[in-house]
Image (spheres, rainbow, N blue to C red):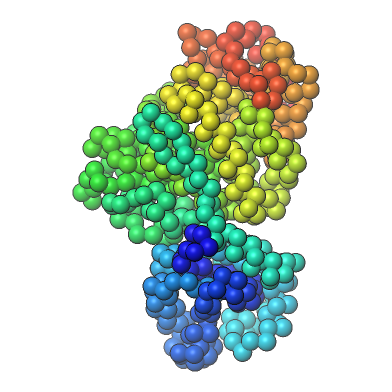
Amino acid sequence: MTASDPRNIVLTGFMGTGKTTVGRLLAEQLGYEFIDTDVVIEERHGKIADVFRTVGEEAFRSIERELAAELADRVRLVISTGGRMMLDPQNVANLSRNGRVFCLVATPDEIVDRVTNDPSPIQRPLLAVPDPRQRIVELLAERSPDYRRFAQLTTDAVSPESVASDLAALATSDPHRFAIDNPSGDYEYSVGAAVLPFVRQLAGIEGPMVVVSNPEVSALYLASCGDVDLAITLPTGRGRQKNLSAVQHVYDALLDANIDRSATIVSLGDSIVGDVAGFAAATYFRGLDLVHCPTDLIAMIDTSIGGKVGLDVPQGKNLIGLFKQPRAVVADVATLQTLSRRQFSSGMAEVVKHALIAGSHLLDQLEGGEWHASSHEERDSLGRLQTLVAQAIQVKIAIVQDDPFEEARRAILNLGHTFAYAFEQVGGDALTHGEAVGVGLVAAARLSEQWGSATPGLADRVEALVARVGLATHLPTAMPIDDLIEAMRRDKKRQGGKLRFVLLHDVGEPFISDDVPASALDKVLLSVQPD
């Protein structure tokens, strides 16, 4: 994945997004051969419109599959694919084996303008309708969820030369790599864009690869993971929890497939997937290798680092657990582009937490950026996302290396979490974990000012920062104070029967207190109730 890397670069996206123009420029910059799959098909089989008319769309898709399999065995290609070619999982699997896939996107109006003025002789049978623009809007809505599984670059109001240069930088650069020292064995964290196809190489997996995922993530990214020996999909509905039942589901699949100790379990998904896969990897045959491929912010910057694995029971969250260090973590920031606005904002709570703990450049980036949920500019920029994740994970890496088994300093990573735990327990489904952490950070900052002699104005700064990333600063529904305090007393972070809070003297100066007076706690809990 460097300038001398022979792997192909595959461009996908809707018609008119610039795949051919950008692809030619990119190939010229890199000294690669350019291939337009539609052109190749027309050279071999005649005009695409005639193929559709004479043999039908399914026959055309078969031709695309044959071409994808053929191109997958070649190197140093820039491949511009037809609009639906990479919506076929078989084509994704083939072309991802030896290439990084990027999706070009544009607005409907821009696409209409480009297609209308396209001088190429290729005909577009899907637009042979009375209202081409409306047809484009409908097709984009239909295909957008599938396109978003790939690393995206916007081509609106950007010159093809600029897009090609950005692509060249992304496609020929190595992921950021961070070494993590641990008494149980050192491992590496790699973060980059469009790197999922290379998880075997980045993680050094040699034996069978077993991917554990959930239905949503599996549908999006399993085909991009290369050669998978066994895919295990966790149950949906009430069964989609990180509990012993979910772990048993993984055990059953491993045993049915006769998986032995030479295998590596890869968690592909969120924190729930990571915990279930981690627990299974730690206990099946007394331990298999584990690799995390986190696909959301919370998993990327928090739960995939440090080896903590926790399962929930009816009495509380994460009350059953162990330490299982991965052999590697591979984070593809392109997966963040498929998160819903609520999921993305929820993950930003952990980024804010890390920034408050470290007081580093990460805080400046958050306060100076537009990371709120209604703005896609920041999270659609792969470069900014990669920088954000890289900075956030460095905060946790430094702390867990200093305290690998949570014996002392690592506890500061629970900033806001004593409150968040109670909000989740009492509120049920009213808020996500990240939303609970967001309100928890506000509560911790207010308690820091009231009891911890924090710098004046700290609480206002934290509240503004939480709101800036698109999170609420108050609870969505009223929660009884007594119920919240009782939930805190069941928190596993308590010691000697006392509640423990991570507080702040100032940004970058966290400390732990277990002597907070009940009156101060009551006042803070009242302050975050709905207005």
- Residue at image position (77%, 26%) is 460
Up/down of 141 relative to 57, above or below: above
- Furthest-right residue in this view: 457
Figure quadrant of the C terminus? top right
Q: What x and y, as percent, mark residue 390?
A: 58, 43
The quarter of the picture where residue 128 lies is: bottom right
- Residue at image position (36%, 49%) is 204
Q: What x and y, as percent, mark residue 502?
A: 60, 19
Up/down of 419 relative to 143, above or below: above
Up/down of 57 relative to 323, above or below: below
- Furthest-front residue in this view: 4
Q: In the drawing, does residue 232 fall left or right of residue 529? A: left
The quarter of the picture where residue 117 lies is: bottom right
* Numbered circles on residues, count: 0
Observer-nearest of 54 and 174 = 174
Up/down of 195 relative to 427, above or below: below
The quarter of the picture where residue 185 lies is: top left
- Residue at image position (47%, 43%) is 189
Observer-nearest of 438 and 19 = 19
Q: What x and y, as percent, mark residue 276?
A: 38, 38
Q: In the drawing, does residue 455 fall left or right of residue 38? A: right
Q: In the drawing, does residue 392 fall left or right of residue 263? A: right
Observer-nearest of 314 and 299 = 299
Q: What x and y, as percent, mark residue 467?
A: 72, 36
Using the rendered image of the protein, determine whether residue 46 is visible from the camera's viewpoint: yes
- Residue at image position (53%, 45%) is 296
Using the rendered image of the protein, determine whether residue 434 is visible from the camera's viewpoint: no
